[in-house]
Image (tube, helix red, strand yellow):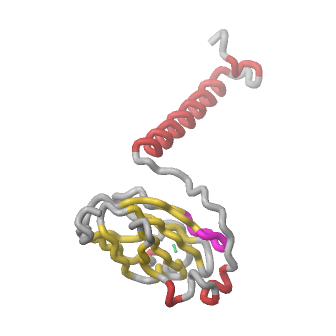
Amino acid sequence: MSIDPLRYICEDPLERKWAWISLILAFVMGGVLGFYALASNLHPPSNVETIDSSRLHLSEEFAEDNLGVKSNPDGSLTITMVAARYGFYPPRIEVPVDTPVTLRMASADVLHGVHVPGTNMTTMVVPGYISEVNTMFTRTGEFSLLCNEFCGLGHDHMWSRLVVVENSAGGQ
Ligand code: CUA
């Protein structure tokens, strides 16, 4: 320990030992996070787009009648949803497998998160911002779309259903 760089800030060898353990733990945890972020292709959303959360229902995109799944000219889909205590609206969405989808979600009240276990779909839904995630569902089945940010007493019951169906476009 004669070349211990921590000796400049701490004289007690026992204290330095604990400092090293904490530092190593921090690096190991950082490494594990980095590994899974790369291995599961998780990435922070980079979309910065603001919206007035209190007037969502009056906005064109997030008005009740405009929520849901829409197809784009290039064959991809856009899912528009609102997160509000305590649910995601619409409560059930259906998308074809192996199709590029863009999820656009806004919160009508507080901070929520959206996560679909078993996929790389996850993002925070921050009031005042539009969250956007580009992904593709590669397995058919019924998935739960869960809230993963504590948003109040009903947080545990905040979820909706995502159904990934066979691609009816014949592989297009
Ligand atoms: Cu919404 Cu927790």
- In this picture, residue 170 sits left or right of residue 65: left
Q: Quadrant of the C terminus?
A: bottom left
In the image, residue 110 sits, relative to residue 23, either above or below, namely below
- In this picture, residue 12 sits left or right of residue 87: right
Nearest to the observer: residue 166 or residue 130: 166
Nearest to the observer: residue 55 or residue 77: 77
Q: Residue at x 55, y 30 (%)?
A: 24
Q: Residue at x 46, y 71 (%)?
A: 78
- In this picture, residue 119 sits left or right of residue 80: left
- In this picture, residue 48 sits left or right of residue 43: right
Name of the residue lying farthest toward the right: 8
Q: Residue at x 55, y 71 (%)?
A: 112
Where does residue 34 sit, x and y in percent of width and height?
50, 40
Q: Determine if the magenta segment contains residue 100.
A: no
Residue 110 appears in the rendering: yes
Residue 141 appears in the rendering: no
Q: Residue at x 27, y 60 (%)?
A: 139
Q: Quadrant of the N terminus?
A: top right
Name of the residue lying farthest toward the top: 2
**Boundaries of the magenta span:** 124-130
Where does residue 73 sit, x and y in percent of width and height?
44, 70
Where does residue 70 sit, x and y in percent of width and height?
43, 77
Q: How many marks?
A: 0
Among the 4 quarters of the image, the one containing residue 51? bottom right
In the image, residue 125 sits, relative to residue 24, either above or below, namely below
Among the 4 quarters of the image, the one containing residue 132? bottom right
